[in-house]
Image (cartoon, helix red, strand yellow):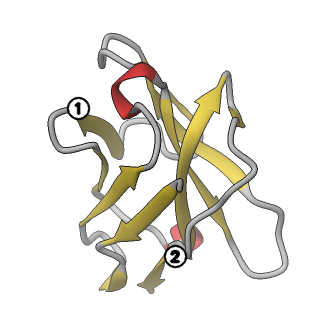
Amino acid sequence: QVRLAESGGGLVQAGGSLRLSCAASGFTFRSYAMGWFRQAPGKEREFVASISWNSGNTDYADSVKGRITISRDNAKNTVYLQMNGLKPEDTAVYYCNTISGRQAYLSFWGQGTQVTVSS
């Protein structure tokens, strides 16, 4: 059974930092590119960042480039999102998923983790 468990969200002031984690199970994690997505209230879910299976390639949305870093640990079946210089517009529920290009590959989603940035 596929499971994606996001954690690490919280309430921070603008300029602050958070590190999100996503623990995956039920599939061969090391074989898949992984990505982070986010959904703000009233908006569609959008791509944030991706990382290839071997961490050799990363991709970032323009809105987060330079402030956010994606990484993974295949031994722990976990993908991370280090977020620095947070802005109020980063407020959203953050989700992880396998990814192809900038599109989620699995139709299954975890519960997400809420990030709220106050001004």
Whole-percent x and y of residue 57? 40, 13
Mark whose residue sits in front, 1 or 2: 1
Report helix, strand or loop for mark 1: loop
Q: Report how many numbered discs are placed on residues in the image.
A: 2
Q: Is residue 96 above or below residue 109?
A: above
Relative horizontal placement of residue 114, taking residue 69 as reference (left or right): right
Q: Nearer the viewer, residue 79 or 77?
A: 77
Relative horizontal placement of residue 39, taking residue 85 as reference (left or right): right
Report helix, strand or loop for mark 2: helix
Residue under the point 75% across and 50% down: 107
Q: Spatial distance from mark 1 to mark 2, Cα to Cα?
A: 32 Å
Please state, as top left, top right, bottom left or bottom right, where the C terminus lies in the image: bottom left
Whole-percent x and y of residue 64? 49, 45
Q: Nearer the viewer, residue 67 or 105?
A: 105
Residue position marked by numbered label 2 in the rendering: 88
Q: Residue 114 carries which label?
A: none
Q: Quadrant of residue 31?
A: top left
Relative horizontal placement of residue 99, taking residue 114 as reference (left or right): right
- Three-letter code for the amino acid on which mark 2 is drawn: Pro
- Mark 2 neighbour density, 10 Å: few (under 14) some (14–19) many (20 or more): some
Q: Residue 74 carries which label?
A: 1
Q: Is residue 92 above or below residue 1?
A: below
Of callouts 1 and 2, which one flags the residue occurring earlier in the amino acid sequence? 1
Whole-percent x and y of residue 79? 32, 45
- Three-letter code for the amino acid on which mark 1 is drawn: Asn
- Mark 1 neighbour density, 10 Å: few (under 14) some (14–19) many (20 or more): some
Q: Is residue 23 above or below residue 112?
A: above
Residue under the point 57% across and 74% down: 93
Q: Which of 10 and 4 is in front in this view?
A: 4
- Farthest left residue in view: 75
